[in-house]
Image: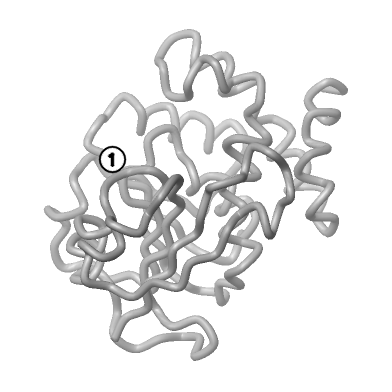
Amino acid sequence: MEKAEEKLGIVLKYFSDFTPTQLSQFTALEALYKDWNSKINVVSRKDIDSLYEKHVLHSLSIAAISSFREGAHIIDIGTGGGFPGIPLAIFFPEVTFHLVDSIGKKLKVIDEVAASIGLTNITTQHTRAEDIKNRKFDYAISRAVAPLKDLWTWAAPLLKKKSLDQALLNGLICLKGGDLAAEISDSGTKPRSMEVYDIFPEEFFREKYILYVPIS
């Protein structure tokens, strides 16, 4: 436990107002993901020892720029092993997260991790985002899933038109890396782009970006 708390230091370097429950939940993630990763590859094996920086803190860059209102509903498209959804669900306990992926075994890991840490504000669904019908969300989030054009095509029909928060209109918030100029141009959207390194000045976050596309 002490080792996990020590590794959580990279998160505590930038966030300092967690409740004891949140600290316990974050601290438990490393052992849980290492155990599950030995059975099902849900996190890159080369990154598992840097879980808190490369997965948890990276996910929380969304929290650094987005103060989701209590009662908001968020869909995590292509959540994989639960990122960014699980760290954000811990960070925003009064917000509901729906984590979807086309690979069912990864969702089993998410369900087990959530149950182990007492995380009750997430649901999972084995599906593709484009197949979801009759459900609407305030925001869609994703991390390294698909080109922006595809993400927006999938997300836009799922977003509520009326925003809870006029300071952060409903929309798509995604984490991406590299040169995005062509991808953004091809998407036909005009996202707000923020470099994660400007939020968390760690070498790993260079050339990693948050893109935010509000509903029109």
Image point 61% across, 68% down: which residue? 65
Q: How many marks?
A: 1
Q: Is residue 35 above or below residue 160?
A: above
Neighbourhood count class around disc 1 (C-alpha, 10 Å): few under 14, some 14–19, many 20 upward = many
Residue 71 position, x and y percent, is: 50, 74
Residue 208 position, x and y percent, is: 53, 48
**Quarter containing the C terminus:** bottom left
Q: Which residue is mark 1?
A: 101
Between 153 and 132, the residue placed more toward the observer is 153
Instruction: Give, as a three-letter code, the residue at label 1.
Output: Asp
For the rendered model, the colour scheme is: one colour
Image point 38% across, 43% down: which residue? 144
**Horizontal relation, residue 197 to residue 23: left or right:** left
**Horizontal relation, residue 112 to residue 148: left or right:** right
Q: Quadrant of residue 107?
A: top left
Residue 201 position, x and y percent, is: 74, 50
Q: Quadrant of residue 190?
A: bottom left
